[in-house]
Amino acid sequence: MNMMNPIKCTVLAIVLVTKMALSVNAQLVNDMLNTGNNIRGLMLDNLREINLYGDPAVKHYEGSPYQNDDFKKGTVQKNNSVYTNLDLRYNIFDDWVEFKRDDRAMIIDPDHQIGKVEIGDDNYVVKRYDFKGKAQWGFLLELNSGKASLYAKSIVSFREAREPKALEAEGTPAEYLRLADTFYFEIGDESIAKVTNIKKMIHGFPDKQEELNAFAKKNKISPKRAEDLIKLFQYYNSL
């Protein structure tokens, strides 16, 4: 009866152990991708570490730079990859998404490779749009999508703290101020445009202009109210 050489036995054992280790590691990688835990490694070009802030117990300002102060479960879509089960919140003032991992927060900048960021019930897309006469990339809140899509750009300004004036016991604290949203629309693959006037906007639609004008007049659609614009876009996308 042939006996296997001890050296061959050792080599075979090493090969088997290595294959098992690689299999386990591959499964771990798949699990990390499926749960979104590997986002720092795969999205390193989009992430920068920052200190967590916004805690009411330690902040020295009033108001908030965030859409919502609390982190919510969400998803990031980049190119053909999807990262799920993430703790996210949108910083309106800085126009970035914060991703919480343990006690650290990472910044996800509005990179054009990012298709969509879902935070709770809110969907953000990265678009190149005109703001104060300058084209820039940024996160826009998707309000309605279809043949024509409607977006909102949230705006927050910051007012510096003010020292107390004469006879004043205390000054004015720093404050984040929420301003009115700006709305944008997109038809097919055309460039995104700002909503300034309902008739002017409808004139840019490729069809159904008569129906849209009648609907806007009947429902008194205002270019400054999100709920009105959503109604108009829902109507157009249903035609």
Image (spheres, helix red, strand yellow):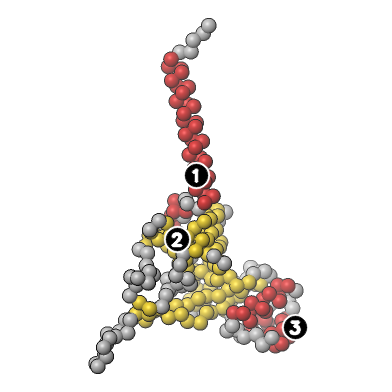
The residue positioned 49% from the left and 58% from the top of the image is 86
Q: In the image, what residue type sits under mark 3?
A: Glu
- Indicate the position of residue 83 as horizontal and vertical percent values: 52, 55
The residue positioned 52% from the left and 49% from the top of the image is 33
> Residue 209 shows which numbered tag?
none
Residue neighbourhood size for the residue with mark 1, other residues' Cα within 10 Å, grouped as few (<14), some (14–19), many (≥20): some
**Alpha-carbon span between mark 1 and mark 2:** 20 Å
Image position of 174 with respect to 84: above or below: below
Secondary structure beneath dot 2 equals strand
Q: Nearer the viewer, mark 1 or mark 3?
A: 1
Q: In the image, what residue type sits under mark 1?
A: Val
Front-most of residues 52 and 223:
52
The residue positioned 38% from the left and 59% from the top of the image is 104
Image position of 239 with respect to 12: above or below: below
- Indicate the position of residue 134 as horizontal and vertical percent values: 48, 76
Front-most of residues 153 and 105:
105
Can I make out residue 69 in this image?
A: yes
The residue positioned 47% from the left and 50% from the top of the image is 38
Furthest residue to the bottom? 167
Q: Which residue is mark 3?
A: 210
Q: Which residue is mark 2?
A: 99
Q: Nearer the viewer, mark 3 or mark 2?
A: 2
Furthest residue to the left? 166
- Answer left or right for 116 relative to 238: left
Q: In the image, what residue type sits under mark 2?
A: Phe
Q: Which residue is mark 1?
A: 29
